[in-house]
Amino acid sequence: MSDTSLYIHIPYCKSKCGYCDFCSSPDLSTVDNYVSGLIRRIKAYKTDKTVKSVYFGGGTPTYIGAKRLCEILQVIKDNYNIPDDCEMTAEANPGTIDLNGLELMKKAGFNRLSAGIQTAVDIELKALGRVSHTVSDGAALVRYARAAGFDNVSLDLMYGIPLQTADSLKQSLDFVLSQKPEHISAYALKLEENTPLYKKKPALPDDDTVADMYALINKTLKDNGYNRYEISNFAKPGHESRHNLRYWQGGDYIGIGVSAASLIGNVRYLQSPDMKAFLDGKAPDTVETLDEKGREEEYIMLHLRLSSGIDKKEYNEKFKTDFDEKYKMQIKKFVAGNFAVDTKERFYLTDNGVFVSNAVIAEFI
Ligand code: SF4
């Protein structure tokens, strides 16, 4: 493939959320050395490929300040082939950046902001151990983003969280919709071991309630003009995240920073989360070379998460096998159960299928 995408990991956050197992820390003492380490690697991994999207994730990129982010972006622009329409996203969290900072970022070339709002109920933020911002900080962040000229804003919403009810989720949905984002990601809380929230063992909505919550999100966003293009992602037409689509479509990407993953051809690389090793110059490890079977399984798994599903012509050409023939049992079973739609060109999950997507996918791989 002649193009790629860049992911830059910024492992700093204002405070550590109770449910978080991402590679992030509030300790900024390493930040300048870290930025130097990123810049060195950005130059070292230089490629002639066209970079279709650049994504600064974390952590909270905006926590290290607009100046540093703009400096890193400039190095990317100086060293890579960046087309005018390259999608350049930064994740942002409320209470970590002001209007002035966002104006700097917009001017530097960032054209998409992804903000972690999560819920519009302050006691739910607290119950999540997300204590670095309030709901009104979230509204202020979106206001600043618009004032700075960002016309592509994504908001994150969480469901299945402590204290949440159908009514409070409606309140969060109303709030998110009132901000008129172009894109919304909605993720169910997953309690990861070794997080403070896991150890607290909070009361959580049961599985049926969580499924109803997802159904409510799905319907509300659809009714408001958002297309679900991936299980957890909804967009106004034309505002699907190009960067995330690349992951789901199995395209190449280069990840730089602690814990960042890359996929180049059939080879997957992973930088360890060890900050000291990163600062000492450690290179990413090769973690997996996908064989044909692995590549095919991954293709099916990722594409069944997309509302466009499996493009049979593409699949047949890529894997030199006939999708209809190979999976005739599964196709028959899931279409009969109203879990999937099978056309001449595509095979994709229905809303019913999406609710049980893991079980459906398991029968294919
Ligand atoms: S803002 Fe995100 S990355 Fe940072 S601690 Fe919270 S959940 Fe983790």
Image (tube, helix red, strand yellow):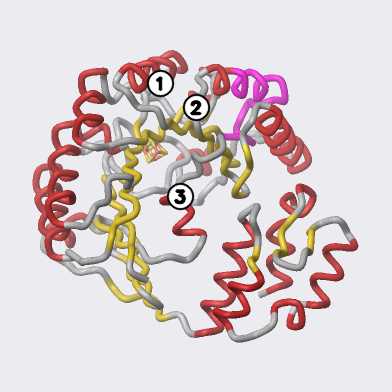
Instruction: Please state, as top left, top right, bottom left or bottom right, where the C terminus lies in the image.
Output: bottom right
Residue at (57, 82) in percent of width and height: 319
Mark toward the start of the polypeptide (2 vs 1): 1
Residue behind mark 1: 142
Magenta span includes 172: yes
Quadrant of the rendered image holding ligand 1? top left
Asked whether, in this view, residue 217 is left or right of residue 143, the answer is: right
Judged by depth in the image, the label closer to the viewer, 2 or 3, is 2
Q: Give how far across and how far down residue 346 sits, in percent.
A: 70, 64
Residue under numbered circle 3:
194
Amino acid at pointer 1:
Val
Please state which amino acid type lies under the numbered disc 3.
Answer: Asn
Could you tell which of marks 2 and 3 lies nearer the N-terminus? 2
Total marks shown come to: 3
Q: Contact, CB < 8 Å: mark 2 with mark 1?
A: yes
Q: Write the start and end of the magenta stretch as one range.
A: 158-174
Residue behind mark 2: 181
Q: CA distance from mark 2 to mark 1?
A: 9 Å
Direction right: furthest residue: 336
Badge 1 marks a residue whose secondary structure is helix
Q: CA distance from mark 2 to mark 3?
A: 33 Å
Task: Name the secondary structure under disc 2.
Answer: loop
Give SS at disc 3. Answer: loop
* The N terminus lies in quadrant: bottom left
Question: Residue 62 falls in which quadrant of the image?
Answer: top left
